[in-house]
Amino acid sequence: MSVFSAYYNLKGDKGIWLIVTLLSLFSLLIVYSTSGSMAYKLSGASTEYYLVKQLAFIGAGFFLMYTTYKLHYLIYAKLAPILMVLSVPLLLYTALFGVEINDAARWIKIPLLDISFQTSDFAKLALILYVARSLATRQDFIKDFRGAFVPVIAPVILICALIAPADLSTAALLFLTSFLMMFIGRISLKYVFLLVLMGVLMFGVIVVVGKYFPEHVRVETWASRVNEFLYSDGQYQVQQSKIAIAEGGFFGLGPGNSIQRNILPYAYADFIFAIICEEYGLLAGQRYWDYICGFC
């Protein structure tokens, strides 16, 4: 069977399958380009270690994607409470005993496998499924405070509060997502704005706790990033990322021709977008960002 016939016989939204496939293939190129020197330093010879690892992750991801596509959507409604119950102890364990990387404990090691698992990703999925399920099953009394609002808001505050100390941006994005879901789900507006007030209060409590337990809450990191954004040109990695983007121009230096990947810290992770712009140009970087935003 040819590739084209397989594509036309594929079930589901072909546009989504095509976008995921193209982004996956592109990720192989950029991962190989950005991680080659690091793989050589760690392995001593092979520069394809992370390329093979990324390929394995892509294969597993496509398998899970197809599996979840084949499941009936009502199964996710049944799984939502179970996932919520599992996510809370996982987040607590991560906060207390998680692997610390770059001064943040966001990961736990999976036994027997040399990979780390970010529990906030699991909690995001669990919370969104739970909020969607709760809103759908309470539409008949969606304006009721105790019957509809409290059962939805309690998990949102709990999960976001557990994620925020180590990963404020993820907690804020998840909180905003829940806010929009409640607005679309016809929760009373006065309760929706009460959610915003509760979020502000929760953030204030976290900041106060961080003053006394800085090893668990990254208040100093948040403050330094705000100060850098307002009053400076950024730290070393920000400056190097700007150089990478400037070097790439509109059309880029070409695949594998990045210079800043050997200079820019975490070029294979937090600052990979700068390397994309350097190698493929601002035009390709903008198209890549459009695909990501459109897919999300």
Image (tube, rainbow, N blue to C red):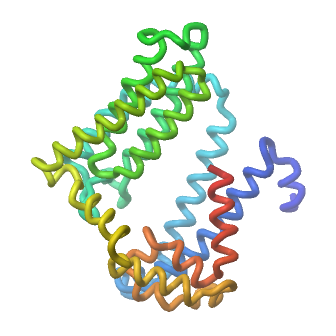
Q: Is residue 112 above or below residue 199?
A: below
Residue drawn at (39%, 75%) of the image: 266
Q: Which residue occupies 60% across, 13% down?
A: 139
Q: In the displayed structure, would residue 95 be above or below residue 193?
A: below
Residue in front for this viewpoint, 177 or 267: 177
Please report the residue visible at 33 percent of the width from the left and 72 percent of the height from the top: 231
282 and 33: which is toward the camera:
282
Which residue appears at 65% of the width and 27% of the height?
73
Q: Is residue 232 above or below residue 192?
A: below
Quadrant position of residue 201: top left
Quadrant in the picture for the N terminus: bottom right
In screen coordinates, is 194 left or right of 281?
Answer: left
| Above-or-below relation of 274 to 21 | below
Left or right of 249? Residue 264 is left
Q: Position of residue 217 (x, y in %)?
A: 21, 50
Left/right placement of residue 64 relative to residue 47 reads: right
Provide residue 32's location: percent of width, then percent of height. 54, 78
The extreme left residue here reads: 212
Measuring from the top left, give residue 151's x and y in whole percent: 42, 17
